[in-house]
Image (cartoon, grey):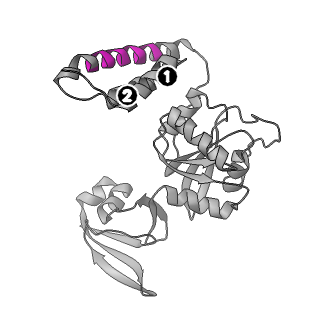
Amino acid sequence: MPVNPPQEYYVAEQRYLKARTTEEKILALEEMIKFMPRHHGSEKALADLRGRLARMKKEAAAQAKAKKGSRKSGVQKEGDAQVCLIGFTNSGKSWILSKLTDAKPAISEYPYTTSKPVVGMMDYHGVKIQLVELPATFDPESMSVARTADAIVFIVRDDVEKNQIKKVAEDYYLKAKSIFVNPREENPSLIKEKVWHALDFILLYTKDKKPMSLPKGATVKDFAMKIHKDFVKNFKFAFVWRERNGKIVKIQAGLNYPLRDRDVVELHLR
């Protein structure tokens, strides 16, 4: 039985053949496995790919171990979410980071001022969002941060850059939710709102006005679980205060009650 993989498989295969680093080869192999058809005729080919991927990952682990004392480009996630800023040199990444966070990145008219990831914390009505500016060198180690980010902000100055950065995202298999920002046309306040909405979060408050973020579609159970899992176990009911027709209404709710942006929630336990 012929394997007959789709065109996406062959695109990934070409990336594998052209890859210069072990990490790039691992990424391409993962894409090849993803697009390889699952049927009896593809079992051997799929097994070969998985075996090759396992060897590559072992090789990558050995390389990482050999780099004793070297500084990793990985960035530990902090806050409620991690958002990466990606753009070409002098696109305005550092300017955005400096305006939205307390970070002090080097801002210069000279290209490639940022040589390693720079981290800052954005405050959105009390919710902390970690912003990570990645170097415009697009090196594999730095770009690996973007593959695990909750969202990506692509900073572009025109449509040409927009199309070019889309190709970069494709080459590095960036699948996170993303938005495009033009610092020449958008002010920091607007950019902050766009970053928040890119995350698809809702903003919630405890009864004593402490802010909390949860994904859209979250329920009272999700709210309770984020505070402590025992709150779900000992849950009795919740009061939810919500604006309706210009008035604040008080609703008694169970665990499965869906929450909305800006709700205030008070949990009552047994």
Q: Quadrant of residue 11?
A: top left
Which of the marked residues, 2 or 1, is nearer the chain's N terminus? Answer: 2
Q: Which residue is mark 2?
A: 9
Q: Give yes or no for contact between labels 2 and 1 (Cβ–Cβ under 8 Å).
A: no
Task: Check residue 250 for magenta coloring.
Answer: no
Residue extending farthest right: 109
In this rendering, is residue 140 above or below 249? above
Q: Which residue is mark 1?
A: 23
Q: How far from the left and from the top, in percent, is residue 230?
A: 28, 55
Q: How far from the left and from the top, in percent, is residue 111?
A: 78, 35
* Amino acid at circle 1: Glu
Q: How far from the left and from the top, in percent, is residue 236?
A: 24, 69
Highlighted range, magenta: 46-60
* Amino acid at circle 2: Tyr
Q: Which quarter of the rendering shows the N terminus?
A: top left
Q: Residue at x 61, y 17 (%)?
A: 69
Query: Is 222 on the left or on the right of 20, as rendered?
Result: left
Please state which of residues 70 and 84 is positioned toward the viewer in this rendering: 84
In this rendering, is residue 187 above or below 133? below
Q: Residue at x 45, y 58 (%)?
A: 200
Q: Quadrant of residue 48?
A: top left
Please state which of residues 195 and 237 is positioned toward the viewer in this rendering: 195
